[in-house]
Image (spheres, helix red, strand yellow):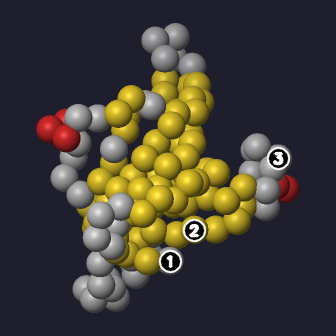
Amino acid sequence: MFFAEVTVMMRKGERLSPRDRAPPQRLMVTILESDRDRNNSHLNLTEVSLYEAYGTARMASRGRITDPIIRPFSGNGMLIAGTELDSEVGPDGVRKIFEHKQTWLCNPVPREGYE
């Protein structure tokens, strides 16, 4: 687990131009192994998740990537890329699940102020 300023680089599998990206968010980043008996892929997966409001009773999820690839970026930053699951209610009122490519730019920050 570490804390980072995270910039979401893609939306629904499409790369965002710098002007279309939301400002970075300060989030907690976790990297875990997901047991195949407890996920719907039925595979052992490595997953990276983002959470906000560390230290409160309810931490809000801000994203999850499976099968991540981690690449160094300028300075202390890193790019984390993988597959993101997304759900959406279609015009027919039925919720559908989609898999999209996703990339996050993560710049680690000190932990101060989160506890």
Name the amino acid type tagged 3: His
Q: Which residue matches tag 2?
A: 31
Q: Is residue 28 visible?
A: yes
x then y, percent, for residue 14: 39, 29
Q: Nearer the viewer, mark 2 or mark 3?
A: 2
x then y, percent, for residue 53: 35, 71
Which of the two labelled residues, at mark 2 and mark 3, occupies the earlier sequence position? Answer: 2
Which of the two labelled residues, at mark 1 and mark 2, occupies the earlier sequence position? Answer: 1
Name the amino acid type tagged 2: Ile
Give the secondary structure at mark 1: loop
Which of the two labelled residues, at mark 3 and mark 1, occupies the earlier sequence position? Answer: 1
Give the secondary structure at mark 3: loop
Residue at point 21%, 46% (across, down): 22
Asked if 25 appears above or below 55 in the picture, the reply is: above
x then y, percent, for residue 16: 29, 35
Q: Residues within 10 Å of mark 1 (few under 14, many from 20)?
A: few
Q: CA distance from mark 3 to mark 1?
A: 24 Å
Name the amino acid type tagged 1: Met
Q: Which residue matches tag 3?
A: 42
Q: Is residue 86 visible?
A: no
Give the secondary structure at mark 2: strand
On the rendered structure, is 16 left or right of 28? left
Residue at point 58%, 25% (across, down): 96
Q: Which residue matches tag 1?
A: 1
Residue at point 67%, 59% (across, down): 46
Are the residues at dot 1 and dot 2 in contact (C-beta closer than 8 Å)? yes
- Which image quarter: residue 59? bottom left
Question: Which quarter of the rendered picture does the C terminus lie within?
Answer: bottom left
Q: Residues within 10 Å of mark 2 (few under 14, many from 20)?
A: some
Q: CA distance from mark 1 to mark 2?
A: 7 Å
